[in-house]
Amino acid sequence: MYLRRLGFSNFRNYSELNLEPSTGLNLFVGANAQGKSNLLEGIAMLGTGKSFRTARDSDAVRAGCERAVLSGEATSRAGNVNLACAIDRGPRGTRKTYTVNASPVRYANYLGRIRVVTFVPADLKLAAGTPGARRAFLNIALAQTEPRYYYELARYRKALQQKNAVLRGAVEPDDELLLVYERTLLAAGTEIMLARVRLVDELAHGAAAAHARFAPDEALEVRYEPNVVFDAATPEAIAAAFEARMRHAAESERTRKSALVGPHRDDVGLSLDGVSLAAYGSQGQQRTAVLALKVAEYGVMRERSNEAPLLLLDDVLSELDETRAGAFLGEIGDYEQAFVTATHLPPGLSGARVARVQNARVLEWAAC
């Protein structure tokens, strides 16, 4: 998969951008605050419909403007596809719309047309950051590779919000209504946990193998840590365990006025030689583990879709020493198209198409 054409209109600090990237490695070099990260953010949003930098869509609209548009044409095994994501900012709030081949579509039908794997400086905190960051990591990968996952996740989140409203007393207490919400949580949550356990199992194998090549003296373990512990990764076993946990936690949930059980409290555990990476790993060990995890994510997404996703690296090579940076690019190796930003030309990088980014303009394509 690769992008043939990319266009921005009033996105971040870009008033207009029209770009024809090449296959292989596209490197964007420039000083800070010139638009390099914005460029990669736009490519990611074109693929996933969401920003990897902010939860507020209005932040992505250029100052003084009411509408931003991201557009592009991609080529995949299924053929060419034209995508557009528009963000409209107004007094009543912000709205996003999506089109595929000029036809409006819902977000769920937009996802997965262009698959992307991003690696940004914030990802280096996956090893020691909050469980929410690791859940988001799983959600993004699954939403791009399993069409039904986003639907179940959205259904779960809505029912969770409704259940919490009842528990807080924000709506009239109603045991029958609470039971309806819990049945939805049970059905959607079971599907979410099934998808997550399968993904983490695949990631674990890939990450352990990559880490063994990065740091052969240490063994990386990646494991799914569900809030609901189940005996077997089957729909029946997960649903039974989830239902039992909800019944057991019912009184505590009423006391604390919040849903305490379910995949919204899942985590992913990372350890080296059986020791918690977050608690005891050095900064270098944590970075190496995240590199291995990203290599695994790329490999899993490629294997599941039978084609290479776009690879987006936002100024992470400068966060790594030359050995780790070279090892990471070597592991990814067979990407079809990658976009990398940097403040200077990374040492040892060859075969790239290089452009300078200055004041939200992409200038002077050249090969290195």
Image (tube, rainbow, N blue to C red):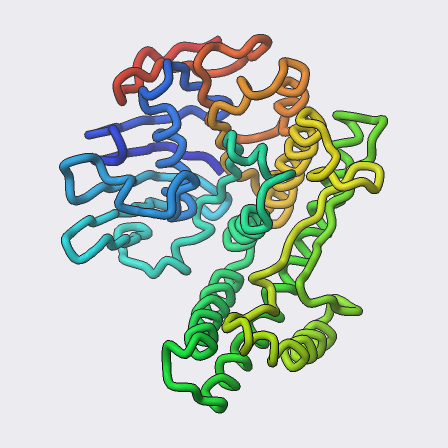
Question: Residue farthest to the bottom?
Answer: 176
Query: Residue at the spot x=68%, y=67% of the render?
Result: 228
Up-down relation of residue 139 to residue 118 (above or below): below
In the foreground, 80 or 247: 247
- In this rendering, would 348 be left or right of 97? right
Quick check: can you spot residue 305? no
Percent x, y for residue 297? Answer: 62, 41
Identify the residue at image location x=60%, y=80%.
250
User: Which is more toward the observer, 143 or 269?
Assistant: 269
Position in image of residue 353 (x %, y %): 44, 16
Point out residue 126 in the picture as x, y percentages from the top left corner.
60, 39
Does residue 134 appear left or right of residue 104 in this picture? right
Task: Choose top left, top right, bottom left or bottom right for residue 172.
Answer: bottom left
Task: Pick out the residue farthest to the front.
Answer: 255
Can residue 323 be seen by looking at this rendering? yes
Q: Position of residue 156 (x, y in %)?
A: 50, 69
Residue pictured at 15% horizontal, 39% vertical: 65
Work out whether residue 213 or residue 51 is closer to the camera in this orientation and state it: 51
Q: Which residue is pictured at 30% across the width and 47% down the height?
A: 57
Query: Does residue 5 sit above or below 205 in this rendering?
Result: above
Total tally of numbered discs in the picture: 0
Image: 317 above or below 220: above
Left or right, 154 with respect to 20, comes to right
Is residue 231 shown above or below 89? below
Tell me which corner region of the image, top left, top right, bottom left or bottom right, holds residue 32. top left
Relative to 233, is 171 on the left or the right? left
